[in-house]
Amino acid sequence: MQLRYVFTELRTGLRRNLSMHLAVIVTLFVSLSLAGIGILLQQEAKIARSTLGDELKILVNLCTQDDPSNSPNCGSGEVTDEQKQRIEQEIEDNPEVRSFRYVSKLEGFDNARKSGQIPDSAISGPNPVVTVEQWPQGYWVTLKDPNEADGISSALVGLDGVSGIKDQRKALGQIFGIMKVLKYGSWIGSAFLIFAALLQVTNTIRLAALARRREIAIMRLVGASTLYIALPFLLEALVTAIVGVGLAAGALAAFQYWGVERGLAEHVQFLPWVDWGDYFQSLVGFLPGIPGIVILGPLLTLVPTLLLTRKYVKV
Amino acid sequence: MIRFEKVTKRYPGPGKPALDQVTLDIDKGEFVYLVGTSGSGKSTALRLVLRELRPTTGRVHVAGKEINRMAGWKVPRLRRQIGTVFQDFRLLPNKTVSENVAFAQQVIGKSRREIAKVVPETLELVGLKDKGDRMPDELSGGEQQRVAIARAFVNRPMILIADEPTGNLDPATSVGIMNLLGDINGTGTTVLMATHDHGIVDQFTKRVIELEHGRVVRDEASGSYGFQH
Ligand SMILES: Nc1ncnc2c1ncn2[C@@H]1O[C@H](COP(=O)(O)OP(=O)(O)O)[C@@H](O)[C@H]1O
Ligand SMILES: [Mg+2]
């Protein structure tokens, strides 16, 4: 096939309808970015759940010398070995508990430091604000059923030597909740914009077909194939899709770099975060069922173009 | 080459059919006038040959194929065997004369080399050898119609269909166009021309098929336009 005409038409078509094409590109760009963010959040929730979900633990902090909790359980200062035995016994006997593990002051301190709970400034210098000695010992208690922790909590909360119970499930639950809201927010916003993009694509094709109606009439008359007649339209749609997808991929990369790696991941370290592998997945799609933006973008412009050119260009 | 078998064409809506049980047979290499008053069904008949329309009932055969039953994707191939000329020329105003003619070849995938060879040949044939670089609006009506004929003939179709090709032209210019159509017919191309131009039909005597209210009322091997008009 001789494509010279097709490419000339593509160029004039893109130039002639520049503002329309730009509108499509911008709408597509924003809608695909939102869709991509939704996909990343979906993936984030999945990996967060898979690494944390079956480890849902509660942390039992034990009393220190000058316990900041002011809990009546800490009246005798630093937790004693007897108190610890009693607490371990209670944990061991509880039917909700699968297993538990002792966390030393040093381990707890290190974990807290790594996950950013203690700022570096508080432990450096000649007179650090926080020291290992001040850090509480504790137990990581792993539950049989992450939804059932009331029994163990109430059993431990009144025991001497227990300064407090840190229940991560609540924090995680909140985070998952926020993720869910953001994810559906992204998808709903994306859906509206996709609808707008479809209308714009439709209008663009209508105008382009109108602008080319003489050429199209002649092409049909002299026996050009339907595909050949439709090709400039399809290529125009493809070009806008490629630009829209490219911009959205860039925006998602920026989100991944500044939003996740340099943002969330630095502040919320106890969660595993989506990485560049997940980013690329958001471009090409997660199987099964969720198409990535590289697929979604062209789909959104090519399908209406195909349907409409069949109507306008029919032999 | 073109055969209608009891072809009836009704447009949507009430009223009489545009064509009513039309049967006609045109051989290869013939030159045929389709005459009749405005609204008698001439254009409808031509559009059926191009398969721009399908008959309501009856059959249309073109070049040995029953085109009313032809699959849609084969229609472009049919149309490549038919050149078409209209009263209003239908040139692309933003293309030069050469580009207008070349367009008909480009869009069906002819090679650049063939286009470079055939377009000037065809322009010479229609008498516009030196006007290839002009724009259509720089030409007279007769010249524009010659460009349209060049475009219709550039792919050397078996059939040339002309719907009132002299309708917008003065008599002297029309004679030139008729001579050109006669030359094209001389190369073996079947010509089917709808017209209600008495002077032309009487001057260039050919077979005449007359339509009246969508019916064939006369088919003369060598006719005049008809005394009743
Ligand atoms: N697209 C159409 N829709 C409805 N009626 C039409 C259409 N085209 C033609 N007609 C009617 O069909 C009849 C024949 O028209 P046409 O074939 O154009 O005649 P002619 O070319 O001889 O003037 C006329 O009555 C005309 O009004
Ligand atoms: Mg007519």
Image (cartoon, rainbow, N blue to C red):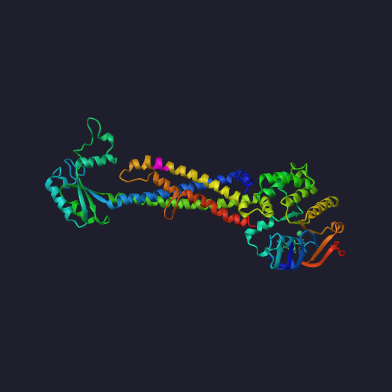
Residue A192 makes an appearance in the image: yes
Q: Is residue B70 above or below residue A17?
A: below
Residue at the image position 16 percent from the left and 56 percent from the top: A93
Residue A191 screen position, x and y as percent = 48, 53
Residue located farthest toward the top when viewing the structure as drawn = A126
Q: Nearer the viewer, residue A263 or A285?
A: A285
Residue located farthest toward the left when viewing the structure as drawn = A82
- Based on the displayed image, in which of its 4 quarters is residue A124 positioned? top left
Give the magenta part as a residue range.
Answer: A255-259
Q: Nearer the viewer, residue B92 or A61?
A: B92
Please state the total of marks drawn on the protein image: 0
Q: Nearer the viewer, residue A50 or A229?
A: A229
Query: For residue A240: magenta?
Result: no
Q: Is residue A95 above or below residue A163?
A: below
Residue A253 screen position, x and y as percent = 43, 42
- Principal secondary structure, stretch drawn in magenta: helix
- Based on the displayed image, in which of its 4 quarters is residue A11 positioned? top right
Q: Is A210 on the left-hand or right-hand side of B223?
A: left
* Quadrant of image for the N terminus of chain B: bottom right
Q: Nearer the viewer, residue A40 or A87?
A: A40
Residue at the image position 22 percent from the left and 42 percent from the top: A108
Residue B209 screen position, x and y as percent = 80, 64
Residue A270 screen position, x and y as percent = 30, 45
Residue B94 makes an appearance in the image: no
Q: Is A224 on the left-hand or right-hand side of A294?
A: right
* Quadrant of image for the C terminus of chain B: bottom right
Q: Is A213 on the left-hand or right-hand side of A293?
A: right
Ligand 1 quadrant in view: bottom right
